[in-house]
Structure formats: structure tokens, C-alpha cells
């Protein structure tokens, strides 16, 4: 959307003490308050002025000067809704006198229709003051017409202002900016430079003008020129805003719309990655311009798709920009003034709902989509819903009805889109013959030269191949090559290679040689396609008898092969495809660092780059008050002195006696006891086998214990 500047013209503020007040009389307090009000107005202290006005209205209810000053202060403070409420609660005479202020407050409160009606009540006076009010009212009315979508009337009114009030209008820098914005919205982008020349200015006058001229070029499809004007706008904006004292971050926020339009240009020029980065850069600013953020979110969602990085979150944001009835959200209501922008928002919301599988909400919004976006868009949404609900017959019925409506209305583009969608459904269902018939009908509409498009012919040939009709595929390619001659510009490389191979097989090496040589000199083809084309040149030249050319190109083919000899075929066979590796990296990052490290060790993904261990931040040691660590004889205090003793790392606890558990006699025996056996067997002797036991077979010490020769534990004396 173009830059549309809004300037507050709230009428003359009160700037003097109330006349006729006696300093020594009862009105001394009122006179003092008016003096303080005049001082606050001169200092642009609106909060102080508002407080003084409220005090004055308590002493002199209904005073016009105090009421006027209060309304202006509220508007300057951004409290436009409070200003409207104050005026609507006042008497009718006050509303008539302050009709412009009321209209402006209504405009800032987004009550656009009420503001337009209030402006029509302003009379046509002959005095200078009345003429100034009329000029301000016309300026505001032109802005309101632009906001409500009546851009043509807005352009006419701005032209009338430049005719009736040439001096004032040219002095107001926002007039030219608003005129160009209205011209863009009205679809008169080709008249912008002429209009600027008529009023005596150029796009270099301000960065807003350069931006609006770029928007006009975008509408016309001149993206290269638009990029240059956008760069000019950014340069002028940085210089202007820096001179005004804005900081670097504030300048970035102010120029965010320029970056958004630059991203749009890059996307249209095919530089998708650069466009994506620019959109993300604008969204990362978290600026207060909701309209710019909405445009970035919508366009980025289209580029990324529902399955791309952050696609799900973008789809959810797109859904919130409009409601089911096609009304744009309040915070981005400025986007509804341009019909194409509103159409895109409504359409994208419905598409986001389809991807979110909220099919009931899609069905509920079909009526508003039909009114805003047209019948074909609604039919395409019905097809998407029917396909997800496994109702292919209903999908075909919806498309046939949309095709009939487009034929009745004579809309060639809608006919083409409906037929292409029908062909896509047939191809998805495996009905390749019917898909070809639908494509041919779409080509017969001749919308945007579809029938002569090489990609269109190549698609038909591919469908014939899938249907098993190679002869028809060859015939289609023959027609394409006959129509474009020896030029392959715009023709898919695969189609040209196939046509050349076919000519070579059919004994027409000269035709094949021309096609192969064209491909070799074509820029933008892949290395694999270049190798195939060079090999084709060698075969065609040899078949045609030109052995010298065949030998020359064969050397090029050998040189290309030598560059790939260093590759290890076994390693290439075992390695994962690049797409799989990239997808696995994204999943690992999403799952977290721990899972990522574990997964890398298991699968070997990205094994060359070892993850760095996370360094722990060393905590600062708390020292007692007055402690001097420089003194050598003063040891450092215990860092765990704050913890209870049982929780300290060096606490070992009290040693407990080892409790013997189990049956009697099951305690641990020493090595000597293990060698002794009551049975008196061989195990009871020494290592050399000589026994030290008595003839009875028992060890003397054991025997003594068993017999208990007079030894025993004495019982304690005493009565029980």
C-alpha cells in the first residue's frame, strides 16, 4: 500500500488570558487559570493544558475557549474517543462551532462514515478564517474518501485543492504524498509522474513521494524500476529521519514499509530467499505498524507455505487478519481501502483455514469469499474442501458450475483457471487423457498466451507419456519446436532434450545437433543437463559426419568427467541425500540440544562439527563483611558454610557398627576358622598334610570348647 500521511489540523489553540477579568475582583482565579492555559499552550504541554481546562470548566461551565482548548488537548494526546464523547455530551451550538474538530476526532477514532457526514455540515464562508476551515475540511475529506475506498473521488478532490488553494496546498508537504497514494489506490499509477510535474515537484522531494512512485510501478509490473525508487526512498528516509534526531532503531521502524515492498519486488523477480530474509527482518523489529506487519505475514506465508519453517504459526496469524464475513481486523483497517489488498487477505485466510483442516469455517466463509474474491476462488475452495472430505464428484460439480458462470460472464481468465484446476484433478486421479483434453480447452481460451507457452506444451507431452501415447507426445513437441524455430529461450530443458533425442533416433541428426548446441550455450541449466547436451552434440555430430566437431565436444565431456573422478562412488552411495540431511538437522534443532547430540552420535549426521559443551557460569563467592582475601594468613571461608552440615559435600556422617544379620552362627569367619572342620577331615591339617590333632580327630582347642572344662560364664548374684 502507498504511503498516506495524516496531519492534525485541529484549529487555532487558545493563546491568551481571558479579557475583561479584574485582577483584584472575584474573577481573579479565572484570569489566573487562563494565563496558565496560555502558557501551557505556548509550551505545547498538553497534559498541563488539559488539567487547567478542567479546572476552568468547573468554574465557568460551557466556556467556549476552555472547551475548545480541552478538545484540542485531548486530540493532541491521542485521546480522540474522549474528545468525541466530550463534544457529544455538550450542547449543539458547541458541536456546530467545533464541527471540524469533531470530524477529525471521529476520523482518528475510525468512525469514518460519521466523520464524512460531519464534514458536510461545515458551511462556506467568505472570511479568511472560514476559508482556512474550509481548506482543512477538504483536506480531511480527501483523506477520508481514500480510507473508505473511494479513491477516484479522493483524487478529484485533491486536484480541486491544488486548483482552488494552490499556495496552501503546495506548502503542505503531505498533499502531494496523499495525492500519489490516492492515484495508486484508484489504479491510475501511470498518471503519477504527470501529476507531480503539474504541481511542481519530483519523487526526490521526500522519501514518502519516492515510495509512492515505487508502489505505482509495482502495480504496473515494473519491478526493476520499482526497486530503484525504493532504494532512493530508503536513502532519503535515513537522511531525513537522522536529521530529525531519530535513533537508529526508530529509523528502522519508520522505514519498515520500504523493506516490505523491497521484499515483494525480490519475490516477484524470483529471488525468494532474499525476499524471505527481508520479510523476517521486518517482523523481527516488532514494530507498531500493524498494517506493515500484516502484509509481511501474509506474503511470507505464501512464500514459506504451511510446511515450511514457521509456516504453521504464519497461517494462524493470517487467519486473524479478517473474519468470516470478510471484515478486516480493526488494527489493520487501513488495508481495506485497496480492493486488491482486501481480496488477498480474505483469500489467504480461507486458504489458511483449509491447511488447518478447519473445513466448517471455510464453508461458512464461502459467501463472503464469493462477493469479495469472485466465483472461481470460492469454487476452488469448495474443490479443496471436497477433496479433503473424499468427495471428488462434488469437486468436479463445483468446477463445472464455476466454468459455466465464467463462460456466461465472458471472463477468459476464470475460464482458464477453472479448466486448469479440472485438468489437475483428472491428473491426480490418473485420468491423463481427460487431463489433456481439459488443458487443450484451457489453451483455446488464449488467456495470457497460454497455448503458445513452452511449459504448457511440455506438460501436455508429459501427460501423453503418462497415458502411454508416445506418438501424441512427439507430435506436441514437434509443433512447439516448429512454432519457435531454433530458439529454445523459455522452453524447458527436458522438453528440448527429448525433442532432440527423438530427432536423432528418427535419422535427423542435423535438427538434433542444432537443438543440442542451443542448450550447451544456454545459461541457467544444471550441470547434469549440460553434460547430457554435450553428449548429444557428440552423437549428433558423429551421426551427421562432422567428426571434428564430435572430437572437440568429446574433449569437453572428458574434462567435465575428470572433475568428478575425485569423488568416491562408494561414499556417495552410502551417504544420505542432501534433502534428508537438511530435514534431519531441522528436526534435531527442534527437539533440543540433548536429543540432537544423542541423535548425531547414533546416525552420524553432521559428524564433522562437534557440538561445543555448554560452559557453566562460575558463581561469585560470597565473602564475609570486612574479609580481606589479599592477606596470606587469612584462609578463605568455607563456601558451604551456609548449608546445614548434613548437606555439605564433605560430610561423612557417624560410623555405625556393622550389624550382623541372619541365623546364629552365620557371621563372618576368619581364615583360620575356615580351615578347621569339626569332622576332623583332611581339611583340618596344615598345608603339607601333617595333622596337629589328637588321635580322636578333633583339634584340642575345639575339644576344650565343646567339653567346657570348668569354664563358663558365671551368673550374676542377687534376687530376682
Image (cartoon, helix red, strand yellow):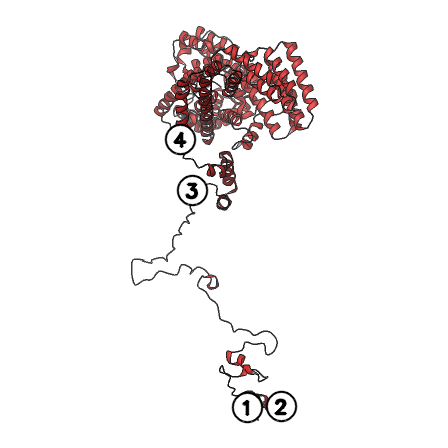
What residue is disc 2 on?
Answer: 719
* Camera-nearest label, 3 or 4: 4
Residue 631, horizontal then vertical, whole percent = 29, 60
Label 1 – label 3 distance at C-alpha: 79 Å
Label 1 – label 4 distance at C-alpha: 97 Å
> Is label 3 in a helix, a strand or a loop?
loop
Q: Are marks 3 and 4 in contact (CB under 8 Å)?
A: no
Q: Which is nearer the N-term, disc 3 or disc 2?
A: 3
Label 3 – label 2 distance at C-alpha: 87 Å
> Is label 2 in a helix, a strand or a loop?
loop
Q: Where 608 sits versus 711, above or below?
A: above
What residue is disc 3 on?
Answer: 609
Question: Which residue occupies 43% across, 35% down?
Answer: 567
State the residue in front, 109 or 289.
289
What residue is disc 4 on?
Answer: 563
Q: Where 702 sits versus 223, above or below?
A: below
Label 2 – label 1 distance at C-alpha: 44 Å
Label placed on residue 694: 1
* Camera-nearest label, 2 or 1: 1
Q: Which is nearer the N-term, disc 3 or disc 4?
A: 4
Q: Are marks 1 and 4 in contact (CB under 8 Å)?
A: no
Mark 1 crowdedness (10 Å alpha carbons): few <14, some 14-19, many ≥20? few
Which quarter of the figure is the C terminus placed in? Answer: bottom right
Amino acid at each position: 500500500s502507498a504511503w498516506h500521511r495524516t496531519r492534525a489540523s485541529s484549529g487555532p489553540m487558545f493563546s491568551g488570558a481571558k479579557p475583561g477579568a479584574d485582577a483584584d475582583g472575584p474573577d481573579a482565579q479565572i484570569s489566573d487559570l487562563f494565563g496558565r492555559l496560555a502558557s501551557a499552550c505556548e509550551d505545547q504541554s498538553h497534559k498541563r493544558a488539559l488539567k487547567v481546562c478542567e479546572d476552568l470548566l468547573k468554574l465557568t461551565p460551557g466556556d467556549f475557549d476552555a472547551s475548545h482548548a480541552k478538545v484540542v488537548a485531548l486530540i493532541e494526546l491521542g485521546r480522540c474517543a474522549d474528545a468525541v464523547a466530550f463534544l457529544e455530551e455538550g450542547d449543539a451550538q458547541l458541536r456546530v462551532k467545533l464541527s471540524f474538530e469533531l470530524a477529525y476526532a471521529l476520523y482518528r477514532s475510525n468512525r469514518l462514515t460519521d466523520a464524512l457526514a460531519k464534514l458536510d455540515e461545515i458551511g462556506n464562508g467568505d472570511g479568511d478564517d472560514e476559508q482556512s476551515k474550509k481548506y482543512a475540511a477538504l483536506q480531511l475529506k480527501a483523506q477520508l474518501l481514500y480510507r473508505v475506498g473511494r479513491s477516484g473521488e479522493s483524487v478529484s478532490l485533491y486536484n480541486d485543492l491544488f486548483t482552488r488553494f494552490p499556495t496552501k496546498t503546495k506548502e503542505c508537504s503531505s498533499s502531494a504524498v496523499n495525492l500519489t497514494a490516492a492515484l495508486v489506490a484508484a489504479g491510475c499509477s501511470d498518471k503519477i509522474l504527470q501529476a507531480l510535474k503539474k504541481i511542481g515537484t519530483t519523487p526526490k522531494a521526500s522519501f514518502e513521494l519516492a515510495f509512492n512512485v515505487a508502489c505505482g510501478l509495482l502495480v504496473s509490473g515494473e519491478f526493476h524500476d520499482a526497486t530503484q525508487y525504493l532504494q532512493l526512498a530508503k536513502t532519503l528516509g535515513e537522511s531525513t529521519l537522522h536529521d530529525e534526531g531519530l535513533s537508529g532503531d526508530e529509523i528502522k521502524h519508520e522505514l519498515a514499509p520500504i523493506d516490505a515492498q523491497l521484499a515483494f519486488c525480490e519475490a516477484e523477480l524470483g529471488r525468494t530467499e532474499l525476499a524471505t530474509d527481508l520479510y523476517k527482518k521486518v517482523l523481527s523489529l516488532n514494530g507498531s505498524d500493524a498494517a506493515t506487519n500484516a502484509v509481511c505475514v501474509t506474503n511470507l506465508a505464501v512464500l514459506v507455505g504451511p510446511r515450511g519453517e514457521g509456516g504453521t504459526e504464519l497461517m494462524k496469524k493470517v487467519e486473524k487478519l479478517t473474519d468470516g464475513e470478510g471484515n478486516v481486523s480493526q488494527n489493520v483497517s487501513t488495508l481495506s481501502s485497496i480492493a486488491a489488498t482486501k481480496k488477498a487477505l480474505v483469500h489467504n485466510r480461507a486458504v489458511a483455514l483449509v491447511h488447518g483442516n478447519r473445513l466448517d469455517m471455510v464453508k461458512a466463509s464461502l459467501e463472503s469469499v464469493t462477493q469479495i474474491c469472485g466465483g472461481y476462488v470460492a469454487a476452488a475452495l469448495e474443490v479443496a474442501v471436497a477433496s479433503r472430505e473424499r468427495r471428488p464428484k462434488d469437486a468436479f460439480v463445483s468446477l463445472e458450475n464455476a466454468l459455466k458462470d465464467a463462460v456466461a460472464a465472458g471472463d477468459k481468465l476464470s475460464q482458464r483457471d477453472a479448466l486448469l484446476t479440472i485438468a489437475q484433478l483428472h491428473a491426480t486421479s490418473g485420468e491423463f487423457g481427460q487431463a489433456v483434453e481439459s488443458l487443450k480447452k484451457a489453451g483455446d481460451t488464449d488467456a495470457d498466451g497460454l497455448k503458445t507457452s513452452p511449459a504448457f506444451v511440455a506438460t501436455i507431452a508429459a501427460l501423453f507419456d503418462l497415458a502411454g501415447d508416445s506418438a501424441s507426445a512427439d507430435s506436441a513437441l514437434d509443433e512447439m519446436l516448429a512454432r519457435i524455430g531454433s530458439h529454445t529461450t523459455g522452453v524447458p530443458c527436458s522438453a528440448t532434450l527429448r525433442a532432440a533425442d527423438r530427432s536423432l533416433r528418427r535419422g535427423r541428426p542435423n535438427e538434433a545437433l542444432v537443438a543440442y548446441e542451443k542448450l550447451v550455450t544456454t545459461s541457467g541449466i544444471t550441470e547434469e543437463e549440460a553434460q547430457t547436451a554435450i553428449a548429444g552434440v557428440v552423437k549428433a555430430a558423429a551421426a551427421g559426419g562432422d567428426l571434428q566437431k564430435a572430437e572437440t565436444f568429446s574433449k569437453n565431456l572428458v574434462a567435465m568427467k575428470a572433475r568428478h573422478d575425485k569423488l568416491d562412488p562408494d561414499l556417495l552411495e552410502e551417504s544420505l541425500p542432501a534433502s534428508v540431511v537438511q530435514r534431519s538437522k531441522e528436526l534435531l534443532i527442534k527437539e533440543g540440544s540433548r536429543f540432537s547430540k544423542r541423535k548425531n552420535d547414533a546416525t552420524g549426521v553432521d559428524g564433522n562439527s562437534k557440538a561445543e559443551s555448554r560452559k557453566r557460569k562460575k558463581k561469585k563467592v560470597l565473602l564475609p563483611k570486612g574479609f580481606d582475601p589479599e592477606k596470606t594468613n587469612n584462609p578463605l571461608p568455607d563456601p558451604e558454610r551456609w548449608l546445614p552440615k548434613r548437606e555439605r559435600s564433605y560430610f561423612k556422617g557417624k560410623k555405625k557398627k556393622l550389624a550382623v544379620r541372619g541365623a546364629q552362627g552365620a557371621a563372618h569367619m576368619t581364615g583360620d576358622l575356615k580351615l578347621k572342620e569339626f569332622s576332623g577331615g583332611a581339611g583340618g591339617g596344615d598345608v603339607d598334610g601333617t595333622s596337629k590333632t589328637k588321635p580322636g580327630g578333633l583339634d584340642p582347642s575345639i575339644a576344650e570348647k565343646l567339653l567346657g572344662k570348668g569354664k563358663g560364664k558365671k551368673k550374676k548374684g542377687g534376687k530376682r
